[in-house]
Image (tube, rainbow, N blue to C red):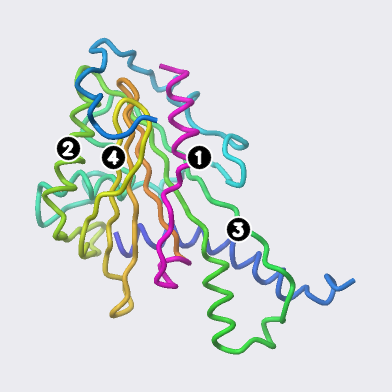
Amino acid sequence: MRSSLIRRTSVAASAVSLALLVSACGGDKAADGGKGGGDKGAAAAPAAKVLTAAELEQAMLTQGDVPGHKISPAKAGDVGKPGDVTVDKQECLPLAHASSSIALGKPAADATRKVLEEAQKPSPGKSLADMTEKEMEEALTSAFAVTVTVDKLAAYEGKGAEEAVASLRAAGTACAGGFTVTQGGDQTKVLKVEEAKVSGGDEAGAWVLTAAAEEEGKTMTFKVAAVRQGSTVATFMAMNIGASMGGKDFPLPTAVIDAQVAKVAKAS
């Protein structure tokens, strides 16, 4: 996860943020001229509509659905493969899968999008050449402070949707003390798992995973959320490189979550 998940997320954020930073700093002279929790899950109608692959694609977010965000089809490198992900504690596998944007359980169909928060252009100031080391570090941290979210929809037959969310809840509890993930030969040590608040759909849950970063003594934070709407589960893996670099927290991408769940509700 560290060498694949972090890398593929940071590359997307860095490409946008670094270009924005350079144009802003280097061009300063020219510029001078719902419903929360799982209480309702058991009462959900058993005959919920199971969306087809085509219907899932129609229900996915598209550009313009979430102001201030760039939405694009997920590429192969944005999503892990089930067989490539293993854990030292089997009960933690649902969290490992969700963190790698792998659909939980055995869905009938699934679809994925990548959502990149647009960075705010900083006010023109010093050029990069005139910055001190500390100012450069602060500028880079700010430029990378955008949240990248991988948004996945999965449709299930029978009780599959409820079971998928339940497996994630169970993993969040059982793996609070951490676990180790191996993906593509690379290991990531998750130090702790904490529950977070999210609302929407028939039931919803969210978790914060703190993992050891490649730099000794540093950590990276991933946020995972799952919202079930009928027989469809929307899962979200969010990461903010700049926030983690600066040792700061970042909010769940609630605008993305709310917009996606609303589209699923209309399609269901």
Which residue is denoted by mark 3 in the rendering? 119
Secondary structure mainly formed by the magenta segment: helix
| Circle 4/circle 1 CB separation < 8 Å | no
Image: magenta residue range: 242-268
Q: Quadrant of residue 25?
A: bottom right
User: CA gap, disc 4 to disc 1?
Assistant: 25 Å
Which residue is denoted by mark 1 in the rendering? 73
Task: Indicate the position of residue 68 as horizontal and vertical percent values.
Answer: 61, 47
- Crowdedness near tag 1: few (<14), some (14–19) or many (≥20) residues, C-alpha within 10 Å: some
Q: Is residue 246 magenta?
A: yes
Asked which secondary structure carries label 1, the reply is: strand
Pick whichever, 105 or 38, lies toward us.
38
Q: Residue at x 39, y 37 (%)?
A: 152
Which residue is denoted by mark 2 in the rendering? 167
| Circle 2/circle 4 CB separation < 8 Å | no
User: CA gap, disc 1 to disc 2?
Assistant: 27 Å
Counting residues from the start of the chain, the first of labels 3 and 2 encountered is 3
Residue mark closest to the camera, 2 vs 4: 4
Type of amino acid at the residue the image marks with label 4: Gly
Type of amino acid at the residue the image marks with label 2: Ser
Type of amino acid at the residue the image marks with label 3: Ala
User: CA gap, disc 2 to disc 4?
Assistant: 11 Å
Pick whichever, 102 or 213, lies toward us.
213
Up/down of 136 relative to 10, above or below: below
Type of amino acid at the residue the image marks with label 1: Pro
Up/down of 70 relative to 134, above or below: above
Which residue is denoted by mark 4 in the rendering? 205
| Circle 3/circle 2 CB separation < 8 Å | no
Screen quadrant of the C terminus: top left
Q: Residue at x 58, y 81 (%)?
A: 136
